[in-house]
Image: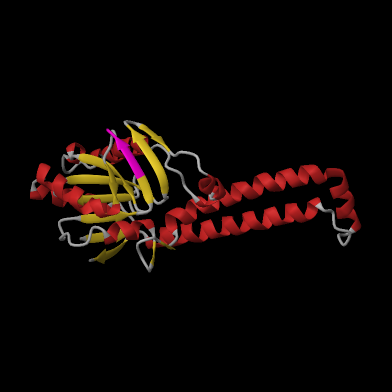
Amino acid sequence: MKIYRNTANIKSKDTLGRRFSLAGLVILALGFVSSFMPSWLPAPMLTFLQRYGVLVSFTSLAAGFACASIGSYYINRYARRRWPDSKTLARLDEVLERNMKGFDDKFVYFVHSLPKSNYVVVGPCGVLIFAIRGDDGRVIVKGDQWTEPFSARRLLRIFAREGVGNPPRELAEQASKLREFLRQDSTANLGEVPIEGAVVFINNAVQLELDSPSVPVLRADQVKEYIRRKTKEVKLPTSTLRSLTDYMRENSKYQEEQE
């Protein structure tokens, strides 16, 4: 499997997340300290806090939580971390890659390198889009409805989690944008290439309760079989696959890798 990964973008987003997280902690700490109005502060600052202390505290709280939330989002998406089933650190895209080992060069994995979607596999089956989730805990899926029952553990980790969101809508929006992107190619009829999507839960500690989900819902270790099944259902002509791969590669930002 060929891999086109935008490593520069990943590193910059990882750094951005850490900076936002640090800024959030600093702002919260400053707001906490200012609420006590310590006597060692310069007189003008102490006078200001005596007059606007409540406003400063609430503003610091809101700004600190906002920065922490933004930082958490980027870190969850772009930073390496340890997973329950592994002794090594890995990002979301690396865990997905590890579970696709074994495919030949007819398959190409685009990671944060395309303008319309972050996790895309191109192969004889067409285009596969993956909506990745890395959280653990209980997730209930009924048709298009995705819910996460309340728990104290989740409340305590509110800023360390991304949340399940609305994967069917996410996949539909990405598929629509990717279809429009492919139609911009005038040399081949790429706008009619099959585009399918699936939700992948990377964390093996997740507890899935599925009731007729509207989109495929997979664990990481089910991804390879899903791709194989799709490849049996659809076989793109070799010329179309070559044009599709070339077009997407030429319009992506990447550093080429190979399994």
Residue 169's spot in the image, x, y percent? 36, 34
Q: Taking 102 as reference, is 212 left or right?
A: right
Nearest to the observer: residue 103 or residue 85: 85
Above or below residue 18? Residue 200 is above
Q: In the image, what residue occupies the spot 24% across and 38% down? A: 183
Q: How many marks?
A: 0
Which image quarter holds the N terminus? bottom left
Give the residue displayed 41% in from the left and 44% down from the top: 138
| Front in this rendered view, residue 169 or 148 | 148
The residue sitting at 71% across, 56% down in the picture is: 29
State the image quarter where residue 45 is shown: bottom right
Q: Residue 226: x and y, percent? A: 20, 48
Residue 30 lies left or right of residue 111; in this view the side is right
Which range of residues does the magenta coloring cover? 208-212
The answer to whether residue 14 is magenta is no
Q: Nearer the viewer, residue 147 or 232?
A: 147
Does residue 235 appear anywhere in the picture?
A: no
- Could you say where residue 9 lies in the image, as x and y percent from the top left? 42, 58
Residue at the far front: name it. Answer: 152
Between 73 and 118, the residue placed more toward the observer is: 73
The reply to whether residue 119 is visible in this rendering is yes
